Amino acid sequence: MRKPRLRAQPRAVSQALSPTLLPLGLGTMAVFRSGLLVLTTPLASLAPRLAPILTSASRLVNHTLYVHLQPGMSLEGPAQPQSSPVQATFEVLDFITHFYTGAEAHRNLDVRILLTNIRTKSAFLPPQPISVQNLAHPPEVVLTDFQTLDGSQYNPVKQQLERYATSCYSCCPRLASVLLYPDYGAGELPMEPMDVPLFSTIRPASPVARSPKQPVRGYQRGAVGGTFDRLHNAHKVLLSVACILAQEQLVVGVADKDLLKSKVLPELLQPYAERVEHLSEFLVDIKPSLTFDIIPLLDPYGPAGSDPSLEFLVVSEETYRGGMAVNRFRLENGLEELALYQIQLLQDLSHKENEEDKVSSSSFRQRMLGKLLRPPHKRPELPPSLYVIGLTGISGSGKSSIAKRLKDLGAFVIDSDQLGHRAYAPGGPAYQPVVEAFGTDILHKDGIINRKVLGSRVFGNKKQLKILTDIMWPVIAELAREEMDRAVTEGKHVCVIDAAMLLEAGWQNLVHEVWTVVIPETEAVRRIVERDGLSEAAAQSRLQSQMSGQQLVDQSHVVLSTLWEPHITQRQVEKAWALLQERIPKTHQALD
């Protein structure tokens, strides 16, 4: 994928920030969707200041925060400052990691450190001419850590800042500016660079002695790979290092198909096209001079294993062994080894007991469990005082245990299997039609339908199965409506229809929301074998006759999982129930 060509945008016009937005130390609300943070403090002195700087910036910007590094720049001189190259050293790479780590405290912000002026020593390309860089989200405000002696919002300094920002990047026509003056606390922070370097987080995988000031080598072409689901700060470190190393082209492999099967909650992964879209926007924003080839990664080696033009590969601590395997594969096929750059994992200090202790997309997916994923259906034909949930999931998913937990929280539960038994019973609404369709030889001697015999008739026979479901599904739906009326009579406000075939039967028309319980297919097979005494082949055959977990999730409003310990499941259900209680009144107001 080549980087898209962006049309030039008009240069920004400066505008002073309204004094009502200041001072920043008084809990100012975020008022700008996008901003540009220009950092002028030397990197070694900047590291201990990052937390208050980010806190101050987050009070003004609530979505995209671009970051531009220009250590040592003054905004008080007579001449207009110009953007100048920053030498790419290991100190710079460590600082980028440190900054994205600090941004974890502000996950509402999409932080993007811009790399256009960060240069490696390279003989590959001539110096780039200075030009205005387009950004996907043109900044509405420019911020800086630069401070005047009197601590004021000094207009000449702000004008210098605005002119500097618009000479580098496309900004909104009415650009505001703020000198942040973060609250660094009572202790005095050193103004001069400290001798203590940042903790080393990035290194060539072959350990070599290096100093923080050591320049980073540039390469013409390299590669990086990952799933890149819900692009987060750890991804951004990996990608930023790769972008700094590459001078011409970066190949980005995005895991797809078979490589996704082992992921936690793969049903909640963003579609490949969506992941690529977010990835492409980020990459073009941070370094538009590169050509990006974004391709699906379908095997563990990908292009890194076969492309002779590649020179380096960026890996994380947990994918380092994979990088070594790629190099062995290359050597076996007569190709040179790639230079491996290993990135330390970012720690997630807020992870829960069932989540990874690193910043991870799988943890983000787990946090989606119980949350509303899409707007509920409006169902004016249903009883106005009753909110109906359709609970479904593949066989063995633990759906019934979820239904029991919801019942304990106050829901009225309708078991569709029990309704099916009622419908089949002699005198039941489906009894005579089923006997007429399949014959009296499906009956026990006492006249009761032998469900095993009936099941053997329809199993693997789509025509016979359709005859049966055409009889049963409308009958069960009508019985469910009667049960809803009983729920209203009992004063219940939430009703749950527990139905494995909810979507296949078209019963989503009976509910406001579809809740799906998911587990890996391998776990479902294990549970079915243990619970029903079936062979693995029979259990797999049962699952193949149902909609997949992915198909169910694609039509669901809420997703739950029983993959972990029972108390984790209980917490999920309680979370989903509490969020449901918050939105029920709003939904009914919408229905009215």
Image (cartoon, grey):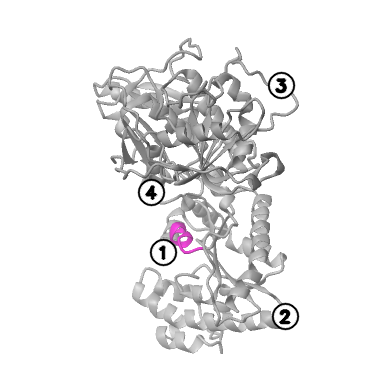
Q: Is residue 188 left or right of residue 253?
A: right
Q: Separation of disc 2 and disc 1 at Cα?
A: 37 Å
Whichever of labels 4 and 3 marks the residue nearer the N terminus, that label is 3
Q: Is residue 382 above or below residue 191?
A: below
Residue sitting at x 75%, y 26%: 186
Residue 145: where, in percent of width, then height?
58, 30
- For residue 53, which quarter of the picture? top right
Q: Separation of disc 2 and disc 4 at Cα?
A: 47 Å
Q: Nearer the viewer, residue 302 or 368?
A: 368
Say which amino acid is labelled 3. Glu
Say which residue label 3 marks: 188
**Is residue 548 part of the magenta span, yes or no?**
yes
Q: Separation of disc 2 and disc 3 at Cα?
A: 66 Å
Whichever of labels 2 and 4 marks the residue nearer the N terminus, that label is 4
Residue 23: where, in percent of width, then height?
68, 40
Say which residue label 1 marks: 545
Whichever of labels 2 and 3 marks the residue nearer the N terminus, that label is 3
- For residue 371, which quarter of the picture? bottom right
Say which residue label 2 marks: 490
Residue sitting at x 55%, y 20%: 42
Whichever of labels 1 and 4 marks the residue nearer the N terminus, that label is 4
Q: Secondary structure at mark 3?
A: loop
Say which amino acid is labelled 4. Tyr
The range drawn in magenta is 546-556
Q: Nearer the viewer, mark 2 or mark 1?
A: 2
Residue 349: where, in percent of width, then height?
64, 36
Q: Quadrant of the N terminus?
A: top left
Q: Nearer the viewer, mark 1 or mark 4?
A: 4
Say which amino acid is labelled 1. Ser
Q: Separation of disc 1 and disc 4 at Cα?
A: 26 Å
